[in-house]
Amino acid sequence: MPLISESAIQAVFDYLEGECGGAAQAKADVVLAEYRVKSARARLILAAPKELRGVDLRKAWAESHEDYIEAYEAEARAAKQWELHLRMKTWAEATYRAWQTQESNERSLRKF
């Protein structure tokens, strides 16, 4: 009895076939979220109250602002989705390699 069933390898093929668009979108979401964090930070530094004259104080005000925190949380969510795609791809590729080895071993055994 094979360790990796036909239905399991079919699931891998289905995932790899359909994964491309989702992974590309997840990566695009990360890039866009990173930009939005930088943009929010810069915008908030410029909008900091005038009495905050020091650059460090303006940065601290900006980075503690709710808009910055929301952008940063969105970046974290996007990064999580990207990491999930990477993990699933790694699982699918490892399963596929194991299946190839299994198939090769079974072919070799049939020769004896």
Image: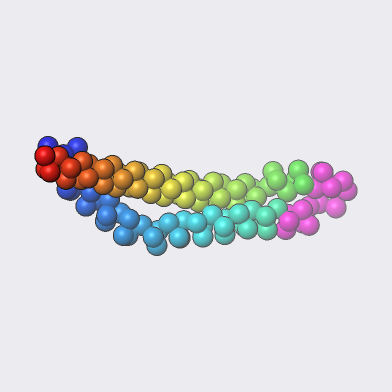
Q: Position of residue 38 (x, y in %)?
A: 67, 55
Report the residue at 77% width, 56% height from top.
Answer: 47
Q: Is residue 104 visible?
A: yes
User: Quarter of the image holding residue 42?
Assistant: bottom right
* Span highlighted in magenta in the image: 42-58
Image quarter of the N terminus: top left
Residue nearer the viewer, 10 or 39: 10
Image quarter of the C terminus: top left
Residue nearer the viewer, 79 or 109: 109
Left or right: 106 as drawn, with respect to 100: left
Left or right: 81 as drawn, with respect to 42: left
Q: Position of residue 27 (x, y in %)?
A: 50, 56
80 over 15 or under it: above or below: above
Q: Position of residue 39 (x, y in %)?
A: 68, 58
Residue 104 painted magenta: no
Residue nearer the viewer, 100 or 56: 100
Q: Is residue 99 visible?
A: no
